[in-house]
Image: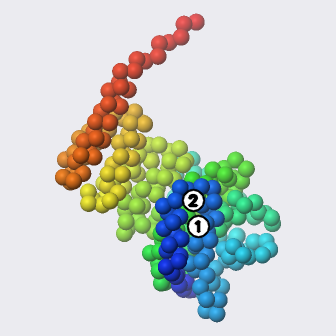
Amino acid sequence: MARTNTLTVKASKALIARYKRLLLAEWESELPDEVLSLLWSSVAGNPASGESQALPSFLNLEHAGPFSRDEVDALILRIGEATRFLDLPRLPMLQADYEFPRKPSKGTAQAVRLASYLTLQGTVRLAGAVDFFHDLQSLAFQASIHFVLPSLKSKHPAEHALLLHALLLFPLEYATDDPAHYSYLLSMIHGYLGNEMQKLRCLVASFRSTTPEDHSYLTKAQEVWSEMLDEGQFKEAENFLFSLHWSSRPWQQEEVRQMVMDGLKFILSAERVPEKAPEMN
């Protein structure tokens, strides 16, 4: 679909302050609604400009009445066409002949709105504070993974699948310009789906695309060797920790030494645990 409409994102001081407070706060179940409110505030703009008319009406949190079936169907079709060639283990298929409920639950409404925001670049051309909008989308990604998906999984499988497919598309925004972030977002999706080996590969790829000077370098290193230990890859974790000692910068050495000590202690204690004897009949 051609992106014929332009949408100007605004980032006022008040919006940025709200975003920072939300980013630094301890996340709770209200996070999805708070992120959706921020997203709408950033794109609603001046009604006289007509820009927001290019958006689905259901993105307006003050929208009264049922969601437009045509708008929801268009969203599902767009996401389905885009993810046809993307295959992940345990990724549920989009439900055929899906009909969005006339009176959606809170979770299903959140899923459709988040799926739309996470794939908005597929329908409009963003202008203005685009980087700020990307930050908001990343926060929406986190809210989806930690709160919305778990609440939908058992009772609303159709909306659960739709949001997962939207989450799978969102990292592509970073594939060329920020491969470290791209791989990290994919690791979160694999982690949610229970694909532990794929998650580890993505974490390693994210770490390898991160320079030692980056503020997240040691945080990513911690996630890699912790995941290796969780998967029982003790030799790989040991080799990774020693390589980290040589690749890190002088001001990081103390923290790296502590990582090596912690990792080796865990490995030694795990290797000392005797195997459980077979039960006698």
Image-based side of 106 in relation to 266, left or right: right
Q: Vertically, is 40 above or below 141? A: below
Which kind of residue does numbered mark 1 sit on?
Val
- Residue 228 makes an appearance in the image: yes
Give the amino acid at mark 2. Answer: Ala
Which color scheme does this rendered protein use?
rainbow
The residue located at (51%, 66%) in the rendering is: 21
The image quarter containing residue 93 is bottom right
The answer to whether 120 is drawn above or below residue 167 in the figure is below
Question: Which residue position holds label 2?
Answer: 143
Cβ atoms under marks 1 and 2 closer than 8 Å: yes
For disc 1, the marked residue is 35
Q: Quadrant of residue 225?
A: top left
Q: Quadrant of the C terminus?
A: top right
Disc 2, SS: helix
Residue 216 point in image, percent of width and height: 35, 57
N-terminal label among 1 and 2: 1
- Furthest toward the bottom, the residue is 48
**How busy is the neighbourhood of tag 1: few (under 14 within 10 Å), some, or many (20 plus)?**
many
Distance, label 1 to label 2, CA atoms, is 8 Å
What residue is shown at x 58% (from left), y 80% (from top)? 43
